[in-house]
Image (cartoon, rainbow, N blue to C red):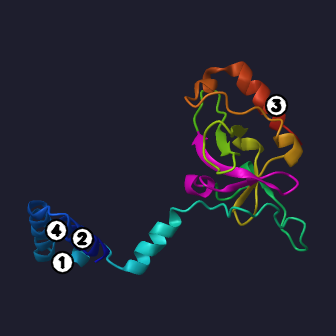
Amino acid sequence: MRDLRSLRDAAFTLWSYGRHADCERLLANIRELVAGPAMSSLGDNDEDEAEKQFAAREPKVQRGAALGRRDEKGAKPLVAIDELAPGLRADEIMGAEVRSSDDKIIGEVRNIVFGTKDRRDYAIVASGGFFTPGKDSIVVPIRFLKVSQERDSFFLPMPQAEVKTVPLMPDQDYKWLSDEAWRTRNDALFARP
């Protein structure tokens, strides 16, 4: 129904700008859709469900939540990635917030690199103000991340002050993946007990 309303509104807009032939073509398409198979056979037409799907596209990070709740009484311990059962799905990682060991927000996971030849997987953490991948992204070896038991926040093994010293991702074309020396230096920054 929402799509039909959008098409109807577009037809009104075309008509108001004097694009009568385009309006007529759009109306013909609308008539064809209405006369075709029942809309319910084409998929879910529940607008509430559509709203849920649109909301799911929003980043998981609640911007402005600078300090977390790790110091609250009853906070559950963090879990090492390799100790999770069942394992993580990609949709649980992408868009998830990343925090420092002192529970301050660093950014969010904007990309993941799996299956390198040496089996080192990485999370690209956008640490810029708007959490967009680019010049302010850092490369974090996934094996060194910890995750909350609710699986909604990932934690680096270092305080925020140290995170600021981590070198930024050197290029946006991922050529750094072939630079073994750079990856070894970068990975060593996160290797903590």
State which region is magenta: 89-113
Q: Nearer the viewer, residue 41 or 17?
A: 17
Vertical order, 107 against 189 (above or below): below
Dividing the picture into quadrants, the one containing residue 182 is top right
Vertical order, 68 against 163 (above or below): below
Q: Which label sits in the foreground, 4 or 2?
A: 4
Query: Dot 3: what SS?
Result: helix
Q: How many numbered marks have been drawn onto this rendered protein structure? A: 4
Q: Gap in Å between the C-alphas at discs 2 and 3?
A: 52 Å
Q: Please state the horizontal and vertical placement of residue 140, each as a whole percent of the image.
A: 72, 40
Query: Dot 1: what SS?
Result: loop
Residue at image coords 42%, 76%: 49
Q: Gap in Å between the C-alphas at discs 1 and 4?
A: 28 Å
Label 4 packing within 10 angstroms: few (<14), some (14-19), many (20+): some
Which residue is labeled 2 in the image?
42
Check contact, mark 2 vs mark 1: CB within 8 A. yes
Q: Is residue 178 left or right of residue 100?
A: left
Which residue is labeled 1 in the image?
38
Q: Please state the horizontal and vertical placement of residue 168, each as a whole percent of the image.
A: 72, 33
User: What label does residue 188 carry, if any?
Assistant: 3
Q: Gap in Å between the C-alphas at discs 4 and 3?
A: 63 Å
Q: Which label sits in the foreground, 4 or 3?
A: 4
Query: Dot 4: what SS?
Result: helix
Q: Is residue 92 left or right of residue 185?
A: left
Which residue is labeled 4 in the image?
15
